[in-house]
Image: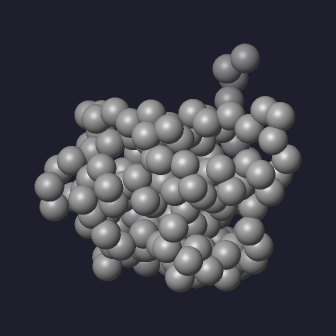
């Protein structure tokens, strides 16, 4: 285990836990199985299927972040992560399959940190298109609350430009 990287992930997240260990080890698996390193810009994309602790390790170690637009959240509640290498076109999904039944929290964390990645994850090549590169949008002022929001998040309501917080959704669908 690379102790320096573990300390970097812990510092970013704030503490050590089994969830952070999962994210730490998925980074190891991505490096091993896809032959990639930390993303300097948007060349590596991660689609995370959860918003748990492990995502912090991915942000800290692989530099896939919401701010750069190369971390996408797809809420399935699974410890699954799909990585897309824009340079090579390779896409791979990593599903955490290990179970911690009968182990205490620290025991399970140590197991995750030290077990072979093939024991921890199921891997499969997937056919997923990379999202378009992040775009910059002008900000518009909501005509109800006065706060600015990105143009792509503004809606027209009764002839006014309004933010999503002020927009009153209309639906007749049950």
Left or right placement of residue 126 versus residue 145 in this view: left
Q: Quadrant of the C terminus?
A: top right
* Residue at 38%, 36% in the rendered image: 123
Image quadrant assignment for residue 129? top left
Whether residue 160 can be seen here: no
Image coordinates for residue 62, horizontal then vertical, percent? 42, 69
The residue nearer to you, when weighing 173 against 96, is 96
How many marks on residues? 0
For the residue pair 132 and 86, the one nearer the viewer reads as 86
Q: Is residue 59 left or right of residue 118?
A: right
When the figure is inspected, residue 37 is found, relative to residue 121, above or below; the finding is below
Q: Give coordinates of residue 64: x percent, y percent.
A: 44, 67
Q: Residue 60 versus residue 31: which sits nearer the camera?
A: 31
Residue found farthest to the top: 174
Where in the figure is residue 67, as x and y percent of width and height?
A: 49, 74
According to the image, what is the colour scheme of the structure? one colour
The quadrant where residue 98 appears: top right
Task: Please state if 46 lies on the left or on the right of 160 as rendered.
Answer: left
The answer to whether residue 140 is left or right of residue 77 is left
Asked where in the image residue 133 lies, by quadrant, the reply is bottom left
Camera-side residue of 107 and 145? 107
The answer to whether residue 63 is visible is: yes
Q: Residue at x 59, y 42 (%)?
A: 79
Residue lying at 57% horizontally and 66% vertically, measured from the top left? 57
Residue 77 location, x and y as percent? 66, 38
Using the image, determine if residue 49 lies above or below residue 51. above
């Amino acid at each position: 285990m690379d102790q320096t990287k573990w300390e970097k992930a812990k510092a970013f997240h704030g503490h050590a836990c089994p969830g952070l260990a999962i994210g730490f080890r998925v980074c190891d698996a991505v490096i091993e199985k896809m032959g990639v390193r930390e993303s300097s810009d948007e060349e590596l994309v991660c689609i995370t299927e959860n918003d748990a602790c492990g995502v912090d390790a991915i942000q800290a170690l692989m530099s896939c972040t919401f701010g750069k637009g190369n971390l996408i959240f797809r809420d399935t509640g699974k410890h699954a992560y799909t990585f897309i290498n824009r340079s090579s076109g390779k896409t791979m999904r990593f599903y955490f399959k290990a179970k911690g039944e009968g182990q205490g929290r620290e025991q399970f964390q140590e197991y995750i940190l030290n077990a072979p990645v093939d024991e921890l994850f199921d891997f499969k090549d997937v056919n997923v298109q990379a999202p378009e590169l992040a775009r910059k949008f002008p900000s518009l002022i909501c005509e109800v609350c006065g706060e600015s929001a990105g143009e792509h998040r503004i809606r027209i309501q009764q002839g006014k430009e309004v933010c999503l917080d002020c927009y009153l959704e209309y639906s007749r669908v049950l």
